[in-house]
Amino acid sequence: MQSRTEQSAAPARDHDSSFEDRTYRKVILRILPILLLCYMAAYLDRVNIGFAKLDMLEDLQFSNTVYALGASMFFWGYFLFEVPSNLLLHRLGARFWIARIMLTWALVSMAVAFTVPLAQFFGIQSSTMFYSLRFLLGICEAGFFPGVILYLNYWFPTHRQSRVMSGFLLALPISLVIGGMLSGWLMTAMQGVHGLSGWQWMLLIEGLPSIVMAVVVIVCLCDNIDKAKWLSAAEKAMLKANLQQDNSGKASRLSEAFLNPRVWLLVLILLTFNTGFYGLAFWMPSIIKSAGITSSLHIGLLTAIPYGVAAVAMLLNARHSNRTGERRLHAAIPAFIGGVGLMLSAYFAHNIVLSVLFLSVAASGILSLMPIYWTLPGTVLSGIAAAAGIGIINSFGNLSGFTGSMITAMAETMTGDINNGTYVLAGCLFVSGALIMAIPRSMLGTPSRTPVATPTGSLTLEKA
Protein backbone atom coordinates (compact mmCIF):
# COMPACT_ATOMS: atom_id res chain seq x y z
CA MET A 1 0.00 0.00 0.00
CA GLN A 2 1.36 3.43 -1.02
CA SER A 3 2.01 6.22 1.44
CA ARG A 4 0.44 9.65 0.90
CA THR A 5 3.78 11.00 -0.31
CA GLU A 6 4.14 8.19 -2.86
CA GLN A 7 0.58 8.73 -4.01
CA SER A 8 1.13 12.46 -4.47
CA ALA A 9 4.27 11.80 -6.50
CA ALA A 10 2.50 9.72 -9.12
CA PRO A 11 1.01 12.32 -11.45
CA ALA A 12 0.62 9.95 -14.37
CA ARG A 13 -1.92 7.98 -12.33
CA ASP A 14 -3.35 10.41 -9.80
CA HIS A 15 -4.26 13.64 -11.52
CA ASP A 16 -6.97 14.63 -13.95
CA SER A 17 -7.20 17.44 -16.47
CA SER A 18 -8.97 19.80 -14.03
CA PHE A 19 -6.13 19.37 -11.51
CA GLU A 20 -3.62 20.04 -14.27
CA ASP A 21 -5.46 23.15 -15.48
CA ARG A 22 -5.73 24.51 -11.92
CA THR A 23 -2.04 23.95 -11.33
CA TYR A 24 -0.96 25.70 -14.51
CA ARG A 25 -3.32 28.57 -13.74
CA LYS A 26 -1.68 28.83 -10.32
CA VAL A 27 1.78 28.96 -11.91
CA ILE A 28 0.68 31.59 -14.43
CA LEU A 29 -0.81 33.85 -11.77
CA ARG A 30 2.31 33.52 -9.63
CA ILE A 31 5.07 34.19 -12.18
CA LEU A 32 3.55 35.84 -15.25
CA PRO A 33 2.60 39.23 -13.70
CA ILE A 34 6.17 39.63 -12.39
CA LEU A 35 7.71 38.79 -15.75
CA LEU A 36 5.26 41.05 -17.59
CA LEU A 37 6.10 44.02 -15.36
CA CYS A 38 9.83 43.31 -15.79
CA TYR A 39 9.52 43.28 -19.57
CA MET A 40 7.45 46.47 -19.52
CA ALA A 41 10.24 48.18 -17.59
CA ALA A 42 12.86 46.70 -19.93
CA TYR A 43 11.13 47.82 -23.08
CA LEU A 44 10.47 51.26 -21.68
CA ASP A 45 14.21 51.67 -21.15
CA ARG A 46 15.03 50.17 -24.54
CA VAL A 47 12.87 52.30 -26.85
CA ASN A 48 12.58 55.61 -24.97
CA ILE A 49 15.68 56.66 -26.88
CA GLY A 50 13.30 57.16 -29.84
CA PHE A 51 11.50 59.88 -27.88
CA ALA A 52 14.70 61.35 -26.46
CA LYS A 53 15.84 61.83 -30.07
CA LEU A 54 13.15 64.47 -30.63
CA ASP A 55 15.07 66.98 -28.45
CA MET A 56 18.36 65.27 -27.60
CA LEU A 57 19.91 65.69 -31.04
CA GLU A 58 19.66 69.46 -30.88
CA ASP A 59 20.95 69.64 -27.28
CA LEU A 60 23.94 67.38 -27.99
CA GLN A 61 24.51 68.55 -31.58
CA PHE A 62 24.15 65.00 -32.93
CA SER A 63 23.19 64.19 -36.52
CA ASN A 64 20.62 61.53 -37.38
CA THR A 65 23.49 59.24 -38.39
CA VAL A 66 25.14 59.62 -34.96
CA TYR A 67 21.80 58.89 -33.30
CA ALA A 68 21.14 55.84 -35.47
CA LEU A 69 24.61 54.43 -34.82
CA GLY A 70 24.26 55.05 -31.08
CA ALA A 71 20.79 53.51 -30.96
CA SER A 72 22.07 50.44 -32.80
CA MET A 73 25.20 50.03 -30.61
CA PHE A 74 22.88 48.60 -27.97
CA PHE A 75 22.30 45.56 -30.14
CA TRP A 76 25.99 44.84 -30.70
CA GLY A 77 26.54 44.64 -26.94
CA TYR A 78 23.40 42.55 -26.71
CA PHE A 79 24.60 40.25 -29.50
CA LEU A 80 28.03 39.55 -28.01
CA PHE A 81 26.84 38.75 -24.48
CA GLU A 82 23.49 37.09 -25.15
CA VAL A 83 24.56 33.43 -25.16
CA PRO A 84 27.00 33.74 -22.22
CA SER A 85 24.32 35.53 -20.21
CA ASN A 86 21.74 32.80 -20.90
CA LEU A 87 24.20 30.06 -19.95
CA LEU A 88 24.92 31.90 -16.68
CA LEU A 89 21.20 32.18 -15.99
CA HIS A 90 20.85 28.43 -16.52
CA ARG A 91 23.74 27.82 -14.11
CA LEU A 92 23.22 30.50 -11.44
CA GLY A 93 19.42 30.61 -11.42
CA ALA A 94 16.83 32.89 -12.96
CA ARG A 95 15.99 34.87 -9.81
CA PHE A 96 19.48 36.25 -9.19
CA TRP A 97 20.43 36.71 -12.83
CA ILE A 98 17.24 38.48 -13.97
CA ALA A 99 17.48 40.85 -10.97
CA ARG A 100 21.15 41.57 -11.82
CA ILE A 101 20.24 42.32 -15.43
CA MET A 102 17.47 44.73 -14.44
CA LEU A 103 19.50 46.66 -11.90
CA THR A 104 22.51 47.22 -14.16
CA TRP A 105 20.52 48.18 -17.24
CA ALA A 106 18.49 50.70 -15.22
CA LEU A 107 21.63 52.43 -13.98
CA VAL A 108 23.19 52.61 -17.45
CA SER A 109 19.97 53.79 -19.08
CA MET A 110 19.75 56.61 -16.55
CA ALA A 111 23.40 57.48 -17.16
CA VAL A 112 22.59 58.32 -20.81
CA ALA A 113 20.90 61.46 -19.45
CA PHE A 114 24.36 62.70 -18.42
CA THR A 115 26.18 61.92 -21.68
CA VAL A 116 27.88 65.34 -21.85
CA PRO A 117 29.12 65.53 -18.22
CA LEU A 118 30.38 61.95 -18.42
CA ALA A 119 32.16 62.68 -21.71
CA GLN A 120 33.85 65.68 -20.13
CA PHE A 121 34.84 63.61 -17.09
CA PHE A 122 36.47 60.91 -19.22
CA GLY A 123 37.92 63.38 -21.70
CA ILE A 124 36.16 62.01 -24.78
CA GLN A 125 33.67 63.34 -27.32
CA SER A 126 29.97 63.30 -26.46
CA SER A 127 29.20 61.06 -29.43
CA THR A 128 31.78 58.51 -28.25
CA MET A 129 30.27 58.57 -24.77
CA PHE A 130 26.82 58.04 -26.27
CA TYR A 131 28.05 55.04 -28.28
CA SER A 132 29.79 53.60 -25.21
CA LEU A 133 26.73 53.90 -22.95
CA ARG A 134 24.44 52.35 -25.53
CA PHE A 135 26.90 49.46 -26.04
CA LEU A 136 27.16 48.98 -22.25
CA LEU A 137 23.35 49.04 -22.00
CA GLY A 138 23.24 46.16 -24.49
CA ILE A 139 25.75 44.18 -22.42
CA CYS A 140 23.75 44.77 -19.23
CA GLU A 141 20.41 43.77 -20.75
CA ALA A 142 21.78 40.80 -22.72
CA GLY A 143 20.04 37.62 -21.71
CA PHE A 144 16.86 39.10 -20.25
CA PHE A 145 14.39 38.23 -23.00
CA PRO A 146 15.87 34.82 -23.95
CA GLY A 147 16.32 34.17 -20.23
CA VAL A 148 12.60 34.65 -19.66
CA ILE A 149 11.78 32.44 -22.66
CA LEU A 150 14.09 29.78 -21.19
CA TYR A 151 12.53 30.27 -17.76
CA LEU A 152 9.03 29.69 -19.17
CA ASN A 153 10.33 26.47 -20.75
CA TYR A 154 11.26 25.34 -17.21
CA TRP A 155 7.56 25.45 -16.32
CA PHE A 156 5.36 24.90 -19.39
CA PRO A 157 5.29 22.19 -22.06
CA THR A 158 5.27 23.39 -25.67
CA HIS A 159 1.53 23.01 -26.28
CA ARG A 160 0.72 25.35 -23.36
CA GLN A 161 3.16 28.07 -24.28
CA SER A 162 1.36 30.20 -26.89
CA ARG A 163 -1.13 31.66 -24.41
CA VAL A 164 1.58 32.15 -21.78
CA MET A 165 3.84 33.83 -24.36
CA SER A 166 1.04 36.17 -25.43
CA GLY A 167 0.51 37.14 -21.79
CA PHE A 168 4.21 37.87 -21.35
CA LEU A 169 4.59 39.66 -24.69
CA LEU A 170 1.57 41.80 -23.88
CA ALA A 171 4.20 43.88 -22.10
CA LEU A 172 5.39 45.09 -25.53
CA PRO A 173 2.30 47.01 -26.64
CA ILE A 174 1.41 48.04 -23.08
CA SER A 175 4.86 49.50 -22.43
CA LEU A 176 4.83 51.23 -25.81
CA VAL A 177 1.36 52.67 -25.17
CA ILE A 178 2.21 53.83 -21.67
CA GLY A 179 5.75 54.74 -22.69
CA GLY A 180 4.56 56.89 -25.57
CA MET A 181 2.19 58.91 -23.42
CA LEU A 182 4.52 59.05 -20.40
CA SER A 183 7.59 59.96 -22.44
CA GLY A 184 5.77 62.70 -24.31
CA TRP A 185 4.36 64.14 -21.08
CA LEU A 186 7.68 64.01 -19.20
CA MET A 187 9.56 65.71 -22.02
CA THR A 188 7.01 68.49 -22.01
CA ALA A 189 6.27 68.88 -18.28
CA MET A 190 9.83 68.46 -16.96
CA GLN A 191 11.58 70.67 -19.49
CA GLY A 192 14.05 72.95 -17.68
CA VAL A 193 13.30 71.62 -14.16
CA HIS A 194 16.48 72.00 -12.08
CA GLY A 195 18.36 72.87 -15.26
CA LEU A 196 17.76 69.53 -16.97
CA SER A 197 16.05 69.01 -20.32
CA GLY A 198 12.83 67.06 -20.59
CA TRP A 199 14.54 64.13 -22.32
CA GLN A 200 17.01 63.85 -19.44
CA TRP A 201 14.21 63.68 -16.86
CA MET A 202 12.45 61.10 -19.02
CA LEU A 203 15.49 58.79 -18.99
CA LEU A 204 15.99 59.22 -15.24
CA ILE A 205 12.37 58.68 -14.21
CA GLU A 206 11.74 55.79 -16.60
CA GLY A 207 14.78 53.96 -15.24
CA LEU A 208 13.31 53.75 -11.73
CA PRO A 209 10.72 50.98 -12.43
CA SER A 210 13.53 48.60 -13.42
CA ILE A 211 15.26 49.13 -10.08
CA VAL A 212 12.01 48.44 -8.23
CA MET A 213 11.37 45.28 -10.28
CA ALA A 214 14.88 43.98 -9.57
CA VAL A 215 13.95 43.93 -5.88
CA VAL A 216 10.58 42.30 -6.64
CA VAL A 217 12.30 39.53 -8.63
CA ILE A 218 14.68 38.73 -5.77
CA VAL A 219 11.83 38.59 -3.26
CA CYS A 220 9.05 36.93 -5.26
CA LEU A 221 10.48 34.79 -8.06
CA CYS A 222 11.86 31.26 -7.67
CA ASP A 223 14.37 29.50 -9.90
CA ASN A 224 12.43 26.38 -10.86
CA ILE A 225 9.65 23.97 -9.95
CA ASP A 226 11.60 22.29 -7.14
CA LYS A 227 12.16 25.61 -5.34
CA ALA A 228 8.52 26.74 -5.57
CA LYS A 229 7.35 26.53 -1.93
CA TRP A 230 3.85 27.57 -3.04
CA LEU A 231 3.37 24.29 -4.95
CA SER A 232 2.35 21.00 -3.34
CA ALA A 233 4.31 17.80 -3.90
CA ALA A 234 1.62 16.50 -6.24
CA GLU A 235 1.64 19.70 -8.26
CA LYS A 236 5.42 19.66 -8.59
CA ALA A 237 5.44 16.01 -9.65
CA MET A 238 2.79 16.59 -12.30
CA LEU A 239 4.57 19.65 -13.73
CA LYS A 240 7.92 17.83 -13.91
CA ALA A 241 6.35 14.73 -15.46
CA ASN A 242 4.73 16.84 -18.19
CA LEU A 243 8.03 18.55 -18.94
CA GLN A 244 9.89 15.25 -19.06
CA GLN A 245 7.37 13.90 -21.56
CA ASP A 246 7.47 17.11 -23.61
CA ASN A 247 11.30 17.18 -23.74
CA SER A 248 11.56 13.62 -25.01
CA GLY A 249 13.41 13.56 -28.34
CA LYS A 250 14.54 17.20 -28.23
CA ALA A 251 18.14 18.30 -28.64
CA SER A 252 19.70 18.58 -25.18
CA ARG A 253 23.49 18.81 -25.73
CA LEU A 254 25.22 22.18 -26.00
CA SER A 255 26.77 21.38 -29.40
CA GLU A 256 23.36 20.58 -30.88
CA ALA A 257 22.20 24.16 -30.31
CA PHE A 258 24.94 25.46 -32.63
CA LEU A 259 24.66 22.77 -35.31
CA ASN A 260 20.89 22.37 -35.60
CA PRO A 261 19.71 23.86 -38.98
CA ARG A 262 16.28 24.55 -37.52
CA VAL A 263 17.84 26.92 -35.00
CA TRP A 264 19.35 28.92 -37.86
CA LEU A 265 16.04 29.00 -39.71
CA LEU A 266 14.51 30.53 -36.59
CA VAL A 267 17.40 33.02 -36.52
CA LEU A 268 16.60 34.19 -40.07
CA ILE A 269 12.90 34.54 -39.28
CA LEU A 270 13.59 36.62 -36.17
CA LEU A 271 16.17 38.75 -37.97
CA THR A 272 13.73 39.70 -40.72
CA PHE A 273 10.58 40.39 -38.72
CA ASN A 274 12.46 42.15 -35.91
CA THR A 275 14.05 44.47 -38.49
CA GLY A 276 10.54 45.67 -39.28
CA PHE A 277 9.59 45.88 -35.62
CA TYR A 278 12.61 47.82 -34.38
CA GLY A 279 12.54 50.11 -37.37
CA LEU A 280 8.94 50.89 -36.49
CA ALA A 281 9.61 51.26 -32.73
CA PHE A 282 12.67 53.51 -33.06
CA TRP A 283 11.33 55.76 -35.81
CA MET A 284 7.57 55.95 -35.29
CA PRO A 285 7.85 59.21 -33.27
CA SER A 286 9.90 60.73 -36.09
CA ILE A 287 7.52 59.38 -38.76
CA ILE A 288 4.59 61.02 -36.98
CA LYS A 289 6.58 64.23 -36.54
CA SER A 290 7.29 64.28 -40.28
CA ALA A 291 3.51 64.31 -40.87
CA GLY A 292 3.36 67.73 -39.21
CA ILE A 293 2.83 66.97 -35.49
CA THR A 294 5.28 69.06 -33.43
CA SER A 295 4.22 68.63 -29.78
CA SER A 296 6.08 65.84 -27.98
CA LEU A 297 2.94 65.14 -25.92
CA HIS A 298 0.77 64.81 -29.03
CA ILE A 299 3.35 62.58 -30.70
CA GLY A 300 3.36 60.38 -27.60
CA LEU A 301 -0.44 60.12 -27.64
CA LEU A 302 -0.51 59.23 -31.33
CA THR A 303 2.15 56.53 -30.99
CA ALA A 304 0.01 54.93 -28.29
CA ILE A 305 -2.79 54.23 -30.78
CA PRO A 306 -1.02 51.62 -32.99
CA TYR A 307 0.30 49.71 -29.99
CA GLY A 308 -3.07 49.73 -28.25
CA VAL A 309 -4.69 48.19 -31.33
CA ALA A 310 -1.79 45.72 -31.62
CA ALA A 311 -2.31 44.49 -28.04
CA VAL A 312 -5.86 43.39 -28.85
CA ALA A 313 -4.81 41.79 -32.16
CA MET A 314 -1.97 39.87 -30.49
CA LEU A 315 -4.22 38.37 -27.81
CA LEU A 316 -6.90 37.37 -30.33
CA ASN A 317 -4.40 35.76 -32.69
CA ALA A 318 -2.69 33.82 -29.87
CA ARG A 319 -6.04 32.66 -28.49
CA HIS A 320 -7.19 31.44 -31.90
CA SER A 321 -3.87 29.68 -32.49
CA ASN A 322 -4.09 28.03 -29.08
CA ARG A 323 -7.66 26.88 -29.75
CA THR A 324 -7.00 25.47 -33.22
CA GLY A 325 -3.43 24.26 -32.63
CA GLU A 326 -2.32 25.87 -35.93
CA ARG A 327 0.91 27.91 -35.84
CA ARG A 328 2.34 28.44 -39.32
CA LEU A 329 -0.47 30.59 -40.75
CA HIS A 330 -1.00 32.35 -37.41
CA ALA A 331 2.59 33.61 -37.71
CA ALA A 332 2.98 34.03 -41.48
CA ILE A 333 -0.24 35.93 -42.19
CA PRO A 334 0.49 38.59 -39.51
CA ALA A 335 3.96 39.05 -41.07
CA PHE A 336 2.42 39.75 -44.47
CA ILE A 337 -0.21 42.04 -42.92
CA GLY A 338 2.56 43.93 -41.10
CA GLY A 339 4.44 44.43 -44.38
CA VAL A 340 1.36 45.78 -46.15
CA GLY A 341 0.65 48.10 -43.21
CA LEU A 342 4.17 49.54 -43.27
CA MET A 343 4.04 50.16 -47.03
CA LEU A 344 0.69 51.94 -46.83
CA SER A 345 1.79 53.99 -43.80
CA ALA A 346 4.72 55.28 -45.85
CA TYR A 347 2.58 55.92 -48.94
CA PHE A 348 0.09 57.99 -46.91
CA ALA A 349 2.80 59.52 -44.70
CA HIS A 350 1.53 63.09 -45.09
CA ASN A 351 -2.04 62.20 -44.11
CA ILE A 352 -1.82 61.79 -40.34
CA VAL A 353 -5.14 59.90 -40.02
CA LEU A 354 -4.33 57.31 -42.69
CA SER A 355 -0.70 57.10 -41.56
CA VAL A 356 -1.67 56.24 -37.97
CA LEU A 357 -4.33 53.83 -39.27
CA PHE A 358 -1.81 51.85 -41.32
CA LEU A 359 0.85 52.06 -38.60
CA SER A 360 -1.78 50.36 -36.40
CA VAL A 361 -2.18 47.62 -39.01
CA ALA A 362 1.61 47.21 -39.19
CA ALA A 363 2.06 47.04 -35.42
CA SER A 364 -0.82 44.56 -35.13
CA GLY A 365 0.75 42.25 -37.69
CA ILE A 366 4.25 42.37 -36.25
CA LEU A 367 3.22 41.86 -32.63
CA SER A 368 0.65 39.16 -33.42
CA LEU A 369 3.25 36.78 -34.80
CA MET A 370 5.61 37.10 -31.81
CA PRO A 371 3.84 34.83 -29.26
CA ILE A 372 3.47 32.12 -31.91
CA TYR A 373 7.08 32.39 -33.00
CA TRP A 374 8.51 32.11 -29.48
CA THR A 375 6.85 28.74 -28.90
CA LEU A 376 8.97 27.24 -31.70
CA PRO A 377 12.43 27.04 -30.01
CA GLY A 378 10.90 24.87 -27.29
CA THR A 379 9.77 22.34 -29.90
CA VAL A 380 13.40 21.69 -30.86
CA LEU A 381 15.55 22.27 -27.75
CA SER A 382 15.65 21.42 -24.05
CA GLY A 383 18.03 21.82 -21.10
CA ILE A 384 21.38 23.50 -21.75
CA ALA A 385 20.74 23.26 -25.51
CA ALA A 386 17.65 25.43 -24.97
CA ALA A 387 19.70 27.92 -22.91
CA ALA A 388 22.29 28.26 -25.68
CA GLY A 389 19.90 27.91 -28.62
CA ILE A 390 17.41 30.53 -27.44
CA GLY A 391 20.37 32.82 -26.74
CA ILE A 392 21.72 32.25 -30.26
CA ILE A 393 18.34 32.88 -31.86
CA ASN A 394 17.74 36.08 -29.93
CA SER A 395 21.30 37.42 -30.22
CA PHE A 396 21.51 37.10 -34.00
CA GLY A 397 17.87 38.06 -34.40
CA ASN A 398 18.36 41.22 -32.40
CA LEU A 399 21.02 42.48 -34.78
CA SER A 400 17.83 43.61 -36.48
CA GLY A 401 17.91 46.50 -34.02
CA PHE A 402 20.99 47.66 -35.94
CA THR A 403 19.50 47.01 -39.37
CA GLY A 404 16.10 48.45 -38.48
CA SER A 405 17.48 51.75 -37.20
CA MET A 406 20.17 52.12 -39.86
CA ILE A 407 17.87 51.35 -42.82
CA THR A 408 15.61 54.26 -41.93
CA ALA A 409 18.52 56.60 -41.21
CA MET A 410 20.27 55.77 -44.50
CA ALA A 411 17.04 56.20 -46.46
CA GLU A 412 16.51 59.65 -44.97
CA THR A 413 20.14 60.64 -45.64
CA MET A 414 20.06 59.42 -49.25
CA THR A 415 16.56 60.55 -50.26
CA GLY A 416 15.65 63.26 -47.78
CA ASP A 417 12.47 61.38 -46.80
CA ILE A 418 12.40 59.28 -43.63
CA ASN A 419 9.46 57.26 -44.96
CA ASN A 420 11.39 55.66 -47.83
CA GLY A 421 13.15 53.34 -45.40
CA THR A 422 9.75 52.06 -44.33
CA TYR A 423 9.35 50.33 -47.70
CA VAL A 424 12.52 48.34 -47.03
CA LEU A 425 11.26 47.39 -43.57
CA ALA A 426 8.03 46.16 -45.19
CA GLY A 427 10.07 44.00 -47.57
CA CYS A 428 11.79 42.39 -44.57
CA LEU A 429 8.40 41.37 -43.19
CA PHE A 430 7.42 39.77 -46.50
CA VAL A 431 10.65 37.74 -46.43
CA SER A 432 9.89 36.72 -42.84
CA GLY A 433 6.45 35.49 -43.83
CA ALA A 434 7.93 33.39 -46.63
CA LEU A 435 10.49 31.86 -44.23
CA ILE A 436 7.75 31.02 -41.73
CA MET A 437 5.89 29.14 -44.46
CA ALA A 438 9.09 27.09 -44.98
CA ILE A 439 9.12 25.81 -41.36
CA PRO A 440 9.05 21.97 -41.34
CA ARG A 441 5.78 20.48 -40.15
CA SER A 442 7.67 18.42 -37.57
CA MET A 443 8.51 21.65 -35.70
CA LEU A 444 4.85 22.57 -35.41
CA GLY A 445 3.72 19.51 -33.48
CA THR A 446 0.29 17.92 -33.59
CA PRO A 447 -2.45 20.38 -34.45
CA SER A 448 -4.85 20.28 -31.57
CA ARG A 449 -4.67 17.54 -29.00
CA THR A 450 -2.18 16.13 -26.52
CA PRO A 451 -2.45 13.18 -24.12
CA VAL A 452 -3.44 13.79 -20.53
CA ALA A 453 -3.37 11.16 -17.80
CA THR A 454 -6.58 10.46 -15.94
CA PRO A 455 -6.98 9.21 -12.34
CA THR A 456 -7.46 5.68 -13.65
CA GLY A 457 -4.20 5.71 -15.56
CA SER A 458 -5.80 5.71 -19.00
CA LEU A 459 -5.16 8.46 -21.51
CA THR A 460 -7.68 11.00 -22.74
CA LEU A 461 -7.12 13.81 -25.24
CA GLU A 462 -7.05 17.46 -24.29
CA LYS A 463 -7.01 20.47 -26.59
CA ALA A 464 -3.59 22.08 -26.61
Image (cartoon, helix red, strand yellow):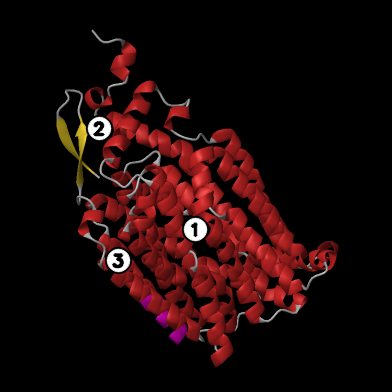
- Of all residues, the one furthest to the bottom in this rendering is 415
Relative vertical location of residue 43 with respect to residue 4 in this rendering, above or below: below
Residue at point 43% right, 28% down?
Answer: 226
Amino acid, disc 2: Ser
Instruction: Please provide the residue range marked out in magenta.
Output: 339-348
Q: Specify the label residue 359 is tagged with.
A: none
| Residue nearest the viewer, comparing 134 with 255 | 255
10 Å neighbourhood of mark 2: few (<14), some, or many (≥20)?
Answer: some
Discs 1/3, front: 3
Q: Earlier in the sequence, mark 1 or mark 2?
A: 2
Q: On the picture, is 87 further left or further right than 207?
A: left
User: In this view of the protein, can residue 297 be seen by the observer?
Assistant: no
Identify the residue under disc 1.
172
CA gap, disc 1 and disc 3: 22 Å
Give the image location of residue 326, x and y in percent.
23, 56
CA gap, disc 3 and disc 2: 32 Å
Residue at point 26% right, 40% down?
Answer: 248
Q: Specify the label residue 17 is tagged with.
A: 2
Secondary structure of the residue carrying tag 3 is: helix
Amino acid, disc 1: Leu
Please count the marks in the image. 3
Identify the residue under disc 3.
436
Residue at point 79% right, 70% down?
Answer: 124
